[in-house]
Image (cartoon, rainbow, N blue to C red):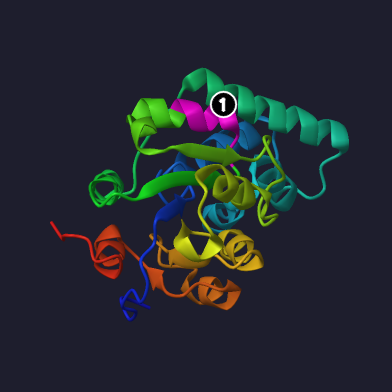
Amino acid sequence: MGVKLVMSKPYHLVIFDWEGTLGDTIGPIINTIAAIAKRLNYDEFDAREARLYVPLGLGMVIKKLFPNLSLHQYEQFLQEVQHYLVKESLDVILIPGAREILQQLKLAGMDLAIATNKGQSSLKRALLGSKLDKYFSITRSAGDVPAKPCPQMLEEILTETGFNPEQALMVGDSTVDMEMAKYIGVDAIGFDYDHNQGEKLITAGALDVFHNYRQLAQFLQLPLN
């Protein structure tokens, strides 16, 4: 994978996923799940595998990693993880280059939005904590609307901003981002910071897969720092 494409049409709206695309929030989430699982005497799990499930939502991560839990155990586990993540207010760590690409896009006159399976309250805290809230005219997250790959959050973003699917670009790190965009004719670029999902993203509909924001800036014909 790499910068193979040259942008063939101008985009007016760039829609980002959050986790694994702008914010590197996966590591702290996996560490929290592991710590609570150890305290509850549940089995250990493969952290690398777990990172692949995070885009599906916290509840799905737990179901995938611990499929034999009873409903009561699952609900208790989920509540404890959610409580810890809210209580600790973990520091927001951005993917390298994320802030700079948003600044460049804004200077280029593009509208920016977020479509994420992250909860709305958690997303709001992350945006405020990272001081990225000023860049986005609209956000949609699971809880407000059905989770990805259902395209409703993208449809609402397009409706509110007034752009057509052909004028928008989705940037995300998971196959559900690509599938969601494909459903309604929005171009999508895969962002594979961890270098582990490139082929899956292409298969799911990505135009190309980039591993850093310098490559995305080049594709969008933005100034390179």
75 to the left or right of 28: right
**Is residue 209 or residue 133 the one in the foreground?**
133
Q: Establish if 209 lies above or below 33.
A: below
Q: Position of residue 210 (x, y in %)?
A: 36, 68
User: Residue placed farthest to the front in the image?
Assistant: 162
215 to the left or right of 141: left
Q: Secondary structure at mark 1?
A: helix
Crowding near the residue tagged with mark 1, few <14, some 14–19, many ≥20 C-alpha atoms within 10 Å: few
Q: Which of the image's four quarters has the N terminus?
A: bottom left
Three-letter code for the amino acid on which mark 1 is drawn: Ser
6 to the left or right of 50: left
Q: Give the residue number, with chain letter if any, for mark 1.
A: 121
**Is residue 4 or residue 53 the one in the foreground?**
4
User: Residue placed farthest to the left in the image?
Assistant: 225
Magenta highlight range: 118-125
Q: Establish if 149 lies above or below 77.
A: below
208 to the left or right of 182: left
User: Residue placed farthest to the top in the image?
Assistant: 87
Could one spot residue 123 in this view of the protein? yes
